[in-house]
Image (spheres, rainbow, N blue to C red):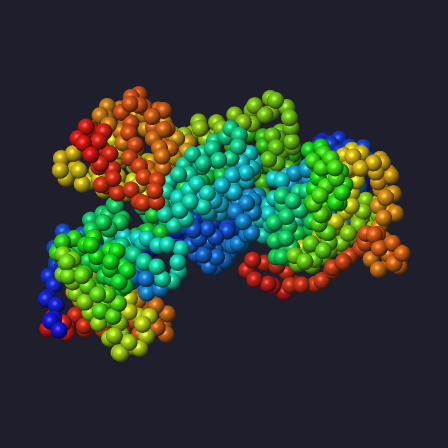
Amino acid sequence: MTSERPNMRFIQGNEAIAEGALYAGLQFYAGYPITPSTEIAEILSRRLPEMGGTFIQMEDEIASLCTIIGASLTGLKVMTATSGPGFSLMQEAIGYAVMAEVPSVIVNVQRGGPSTGLPTAVAQGDVNQARWGTHGDHAIVTLTASNLQDVFLMTVAGFNMAEAFRTPVILLFDEVVAHMREKVVVPGPGEIEIFERLRTSVPEGTNYHPYLRREDGRLPMSDFGGVHRYNVTGLVHDMWGFPSTDSTIAYDLLHHLVDKLENRADSIARYKEYFTDDARVLLISYGSSARSALQMVVDRRKKGGKLGLLELQSLWPFPAETVREKCEGRTHILVVEMNMGQICHEVKKVVSRPERVFLANRFDGIFISPGDILRVLNMVQGKGV
Amino acid sequence: MPVKDYLRLRFLPHIWCPGCGHGIVMSGMIRAIEEIGLEKNEVVVVSGIGCSSRMAGYLDFHTMHTLHGRALAFATGVKLGRPDLTVIVPMGDGDALAIGGNHFIHAARRDIDLTAVIMNNRIYGMTGGQGSPMTPQGMRSTTAPRGIADAAFDLVELAKGAGASFVARTTTFHATELTRMIEKAIRHKGFSVVEVMSQCPTYYGRQNRLGNGVEMMKGFRDNTTSIGSKKREARPDLIERGIFVDEDRPVYSPEGLKAD
Amino acid sequence: MRKPKKPNKQTQKTSSTMQTQRIILSGSGGQGVITAAIILAEAAVLYEDLNAVQTQSYGPESRGGATRADVIISDAPIYYPKVEQPNLAACLTQEAYNRYSRSIRPGGLLLTDRHYVRQDPRIDAHQVPLDMHETVMKEIGNPIVLNICMLGALIGLTVLIRPESVAHVLERRVPAEFLDMNRMALQTGLDMVTKMTR
C-alpha cells in the first residue's frame, strides 16, 4: 500500500477554494447560500471558527459583501462566495471596494444564466460581468483555474493580489470545477509566499493621509480601531478620504484606480501552455472548458495533429500581450468557452489576424466535450461537420 | 472636551440646510460619547447615503460613509472584526427603512451590538423631497403631489417586532432627552434603535406647509408626549417619546450566544 | 435460473500503463451512489497512488430523481472529467438503467440489482444482475449500505482497486457507529461475486 501522505487530499473544488483561502490567511467570511457555491460556506462555517476566524451567514449577498468590506477595514483578510444571481446583487458593493480600495476576495462559482437560469448546470457566462458588472470606469482582477490544485493556488494568489493592490479580486470558477473531486496536495506552511497588506509607518500624533499615494503608487493602510482616524467613502475623495467634486482630484483618482492594475497587467497575468511550441492550431480556454480543450489537444496529438493550448488563469486585466504573442503565426485560433464568445471577443481585439479566431462553445448547460470542440475545428478547417 | 474637539474642522462647513435637525442629533451624539468617556479611537461611525449620512465625515472617529441602505451591513463587519469598538450607525428614514429595510430587520433579529440612530425627517432630503416609508399617508412629496397613498412604518413597532433589545424615540426639540437616550443606547449591549424625529424645512416642511425649522420643532413639542402620559387620553394622536424596550440579553456573537 | 457468465476482468493492475477506467454509478437520490463514487475515487488516489476524478450530475431533488456519478481512474493525468462511454457501470434503479445503460462501451460491464432493475438483453455489455438489495436486507438488515455492497461487488468483478483501500476510506469517512455495518456491506458485495464466479 502506498503510504498515506497527510498533505494529499481528495476533495471537491469548493473545498479546494475554502482550503486555499485558509492557507492564504482568511480570517472573516460572510455569505448567503446559493448553488453551486454553497459548500464553500458550509465548509468554512466549521473550519474558520476552528482556526480563530469568524463566519457569519447574512440576509443576502448585498449584506455579505458589505460586511466583509467592513471587516477588511479592521485589518482582516476577508472573502465571500456566491453564484450568478448573488454576484449580480454584489455589483454595487464591488464598486465600493474598488473606489475605497478595500482588499477583498469574491468567489463566483458560475452557473447557467441569465436570471435564475440553470442553477445546477455549468456555464461561463459571467466573464464580462466580472469585468464590467459594477458601474463606472474601473479595473478589476479576475482569476480562474481548471484543476483543483490550480484552484487552490489561484485562491491563494487572489488573496495575495487583493492585499498587494488594495482591490477586490474576483475568483471566477464554474460548476464543473467546483463540484468535481480530485487530488489536491496542500502545500506546507511557507511553501507559497503569503502577502500581508502594507500598513502605515506614520506614528501616532502625525497626520496620516489614507489616500495619499507613495511614489510607487501604493497606499499604506491603517486598521480601524488603530491610532489613525480617517474617513472612507464611495464618493470621489481627496487624500484625506473626504468627499470632493474637484475635477483634478476625480481625474487623478480614476486614473490611479485603473492604472494600478492595468499597468501591472503583465505581472498579474497567469497562464499555462500545452504543446504550443510547434502548434499550428492554438486553442485558448480557461476554467473547466480548458480540460476538454486539453483532452482534445492530447487526443489529436496522438494522431499527429499539431495542436496546442493556451490556458488563461487570469482573465482581467486581459493578458493582451501574452495572447497576441502566443497567437502569432498560427493557422487557426480556437477559443473554447461556455458562453457566447466573451473571451473570444477579447482575443479578436488583440490579435493581428482576427479573421483566424474562431469560437467553440456551448451555453446550454451541457459541459463542452472534446467532441464538441473537434466538430468546430473540422468545420473551420474546411473538413466538414 | 468641547464639542468642536470631536469634529473634523477641516471638513466643515457641513452640507445641511438652515433649520435642519441633523446638527442637533450630531451634537447629542457627541455629548453622549463624551458622557460615557469613550476615547475617539474606540468609536467607529458607519453611515449610508443621504443628508444624515454625511455626519460620518464630520466626526473625528474612525468613519465610513458607505452605500445607500447598507450601513448596518458594513457596520456588522466592523463590529465582528473588532468587537471591542463602539459602532454607531447614523441613518435617515429612507436609508434605514426603504432600501436598507432588510438589513435593519436582520440586524435587529441578530440583536448585534450596534447603535442605530435614525433621523426621521419623513422625506428624502438629499435628492430633493421624495416620499419615504416614513412619510405619513396623505402628506405631499415631489413624487406624491396629491398626497402619499402608502401607509408609513411605525419605526418603534418595527424595531420591537424584529427583535431589537433597545428601542427609543425622541425628537430634536427634546435635546437633553436626545443625548440621554443616545447615551443609554450606546451603553446598551445589543441592537439599539433610537428614532429621532428630525425636521427638513426645505423639502418636507415647505411642501406640507409646516413652516420653518423652529415651527417644525414646536410641532414636535406639541404633538408628542412621554410614554404613559395622561395627555394621550384626551389626545390619542400624540406620538409617544421614551424608551420602549430595554432588555438585557446575552451578547450576540456568530459563534453562539455568550454571557456578557 | 442461469448463472451469468463470468465477466472478463477489466483490469490487470500490474503494469504501469493501466487501462483508464471510466465508471458511471447511477440510481435515485438518497441511494448513496455519489458517496460510493467518492469513496471509490478517494481510495484510488490516497491508497493506490492513482489519479481519479469524480463528478456528478444532479437536479434540485435531494431525494428521488435520477442521480449519476462519474469516476475516472487512471495512472495518467485526467483532463476531460466526464464519462461519455463507461466501461463499467452500475444502475440501482430502472430509471437510471433506462437512461444510462445504452451509453456503455461495447463489451463493458454493467452491474444491476435484481430487486430494482429488469435488464434489457439487447444491451451490448456483460450484464451482471445481483441480488444485492435482498442480501443486504437479509444479512445486515439496513438498505442504507446498499451502495457499499455495490462497491464491493464492482471491485470483486473488476479488480479495479483493492478492497483494503476502500476499507481505509470507510474508516476515514464513516462515523464509528456505522463502520461495522459498512465493512460488512463491502464484504457482502465481494462475497456475492466470489459465490457467483465459483
The tally of labels here is 0
Measured as percent of width and height from the top left, residue C95 is found at 28, 60
Measured as percent of width and height from the top left, residue A45 is found at 48, 57
Q: Residue at x 35, y 40 (%)?
A: A363
Nearer to us in this view, B224 or C162: B224
Relative to A244, is C131 above or below? Answer: below
Nearer to us in this view, B9 or B23: B23
Where the N terminus of chain A falls, by quadrant? bottom left
Nearer to us in this view, B109 or A268: B109
Q: Is residue B131 visible?
A: yes
Q: Residue at x 19, y 63 (%)?
A: C119
Horizontal relation, residue B223 to residue C166: left or right? right
Horizontal relation, residue A139 to residue A379: left or right? right
Measured as percent of width and height from the top left, residue C39 is found at 29, 61
Q: Is residue A267 visible?
A: no
The answer to which quarter of the image holds residue B158 is bottom right
Where the C terminus of chain A falls, by quadrant? top left
Measured as percent of width and height from the top left, residue A24 is found at 43, 47
Q: Residue at x 87, y 47 (%)?
A: B221
Nearer to us in this view, B13 or A180: A180
Q: Residue at x 20, y 28 (%)?
A: A381
